[in-house]
Image (tube, rainbow, N blue to C red):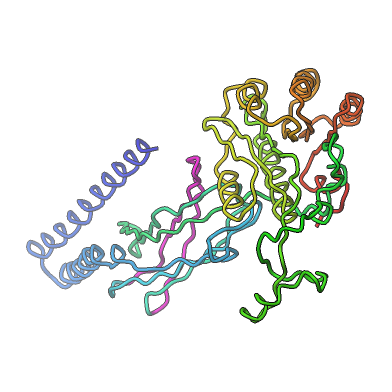
Amino acid sequence: MMRETFVQKWTERQRASKQFWAVLASFLGSLCFLLFQGGKLALMLFVIMSILSIYLLLGQWSGIKRTQGARTLYNVDHGGTLEAGSSLGIAIQLQIPGFWPMPYIFVKDRLYHKNGSELVFEATIVPDWRRRGEWEYRTPALRRGSYSFGTTECVTEDIFGLFEHSGSLDLPHSIVVLPQTIQIREWQQFHQMMKGTNHHSTTTRAVRETTQINGVREYIYGDRLSRIHWNATAKTGTWKSKEFERESLPKTYLVLDRERKAYPDPELFELAVSVAASLFQYGHSRALALGLLSTGADDTYFEPKLGQNQQKTVQQHFIQVEPDGAYSLRQVLREKVQTLVPGSFIAIISPIHGEPMLQIISWLKQLQLNPCHLWLCTDTDAKERWIKQLRSSGVTGYAISSLHELPVVLGGRSG
């Protein structure tokens, strides 16, 4: 890319040099015609060439190199974030100082993804009499990740199209595109992964509370009168409720398969990340402590715990994560699950199925862990057959072809 830019600049300089000498030769020719021939025609020709030469010379001070501007972003929140699949609206306002006649401005804007890919947007705008111009455009649907805007290039030409004059302005902006998520109303079969315990639902109402007060929380419509914390309500002026400690649930871990060979289609990994992010969002809304195991080029492990900080940290990981693992899912689990407490729930998000997954599940059960497979399904014909095979082994499984199917197969409706 740098080589192409260098060649392009060298070619432009050569072209400008030829045009400069051509204009200079024309001016000198008219001057010689006036000196040696004389007459009204020679004088008129010399005057015209002088005016044109002065006009072309003044183009070096067109003001394009001192262009000022501002960029405005739409469809993003105050933190500069939006969800994957969304389109970003951009408006660029330009102000060119000077007085040299400027018929149009060719503007080029660049948006860089963290993985090195580039989106280029180009347009031609006509400035008004105050040498101001505005350009609005929209990006295509953006994929998950971090983005930053590069230098905005502005190019103009004289009215004859002989010489180009360019400038650039730095309007730094960065945005973060979150993985696409979907609201999960209920995971009705979650209790099937809790065999050997006395818990039968993932909702906070199903988790039995102790009599030990753990703190104060915001009042939720429907709280009993006995739960209201009157002292905190009087001090803050807003309704507060008592928060009681809950009986501990068996630990739950999500395993995100990041093996590079497992994802021939990049969209399949995007689905995997969206499923994991949606489940974490569900757990956060139901006060469920979820852990995460995600091993690729980096080794990421989050112990199950509640809290806003945990949610933000996991979300940041989902923004940057890529299918860059060199090791198989079996190898990754072999290094990690030995330290897990027996009885823990392991929800595996992976496109792998068949005998390799059956071997992993059998091995996890031998370690007294409760596995569950969220299969990223690409073979619709094998969907029912694989789920039946899992159930015959006493394991809960779900086949997911798209994110919209996730709430449905978990037993609820999409939000």
Horizontal relation, residue 94 to residue 363: left or right: left
Q: Foreground: 139 or 242?
A: 242
**Picture residue at 78% right of the left edge, 35% below the top:** 374
Whole-percent x, y for residue 299 in the image: 54, 32
Where 76 sits versus 184, above or below?
Answer: below
Whole-percent x, y for residue 122 in the image: 49, 56
First to last magenta residue range: 101-129
Horizontal relation, residue 355 to residue 142: left or right: right
Q: Count of labels shown? A: 0
Whole-percent x, y for residue 113 in the image: 50, 46
**Picture residue at 56% right of the left edge, 44% below the top:** 317
What is the quadrant of the N terminus in the image? top left
Residue 126 is one of the magenta-drawn residues: yes
Horizontal relation, residue 376 to residue 200: left or right: left
Where 303 sits versus 287, above or below?
Answer: above
**Picture residue at 47% right of the left edge, 62% below the top:** 124
Q: Quadrant of residue 133?
A: bottom left
Q: Foreground: 42 or 347?
A: 347
Residue 193 is one of the magenta-drawn residues: no
Residue at the front extreme, as displayed: 211
**Picture residue at 37% right of the left edge, 79% below the top:** 130
Q: Quadrant of residue 99?
A: bottom left
What is the quadrant of the C terminus in the image? bottom right
